[in-house]
Amino acid sequence: MEEKLLIYYMWYPSKESPQTHHENGRYLLKQALKNEYDIEFTEEMLEHKEYGKPVLKHGPVQFSISHCKGMAVCVLSPFALGADTEGPRRVTEALIDRVCCEKESRYVKEYGCRYKAQRFLRLWTLKESYLKMTGEGLRLPLDQVQFEITRELEPGKWVFPKEIGSSRQGNFWQIELKKDYILSICMEKTEESSSMLKKEPTLKEILHW
């Protein structure tokens, strides 16, 4: 299999329960492993690392699952990774101040309300993707994972690692899959993974089961 990021994703009614969100993510992982590697997934194949991050015990690939109201994603990679997705939501000044450093706050508020929510969600999902890649979760304050984005979002078009600067080690991709639904991916930064930096990730939509 070619070394590149592979994203399975699914849309579903936003009113579904949090448990169903989780089940949708697991379903995507099951479909991805079966379709790409002919692996029949079971929960017994998983183990948990130091901070609770789930990984395949003996699998040929790394994965990360994320979901929000109305959407679930499962990303596969030959290298350690984290993925985070968010949909439309209300963004308050208090939330911006909690998540962003001073420079990021200026970026979010630069054009007033017009782009505030989108810019905030871009930063938030990037931060979450990094923390999911390392497995640290909320043990590291979000304002200590800082970003500088040099390209605006265009629906359906990828923003590549060279366009996303970070205070932390990682390669980052980002896309708006549908209006106000943003997906960010962080992959570990190694000499081996550098060959993937210019490759466009592959998207595969799976129908709601």
Image (spheres, rainbow, N blue to C red):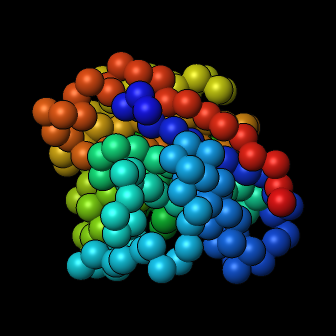
Give the side of residue 192 with respect to residue 66, left or right. Answer: left
Identify the residue at image location x=70%, y=80%.
19
Q: Residue 42, percent across and down?
A: 56, 73
Give the side of residue 150 with respect to residue 49, left or right. Answer: right
Q: Residue 151, percent across and down?
A: 44, 23
User: Which quadrant would residue 21 be assigned to in this image?
Assistant: bottom right
User: Which quadrant would residue 3 be assigned to in this image?
Assistant: top left
User: Which quadrant would residue 209 be assigned to in this image?
Assistant: bottom right
Q: Is residue 68 visible?
A: no
Give the side of residue 55 with respect to residue 167, left or right. Answer: right
Identify the residue at image location x=42%, y=74%.
46
Q: Nearer the viewer, residue 108 or 127?
A: 127
Q: Residue 59, percent across and down?
A: 38, 58
Identify the residue at image location x=71%, y=55%.
71
Identify the residue at image location x=62%, y=45%.
35
**Outermost residue to the top:** 198
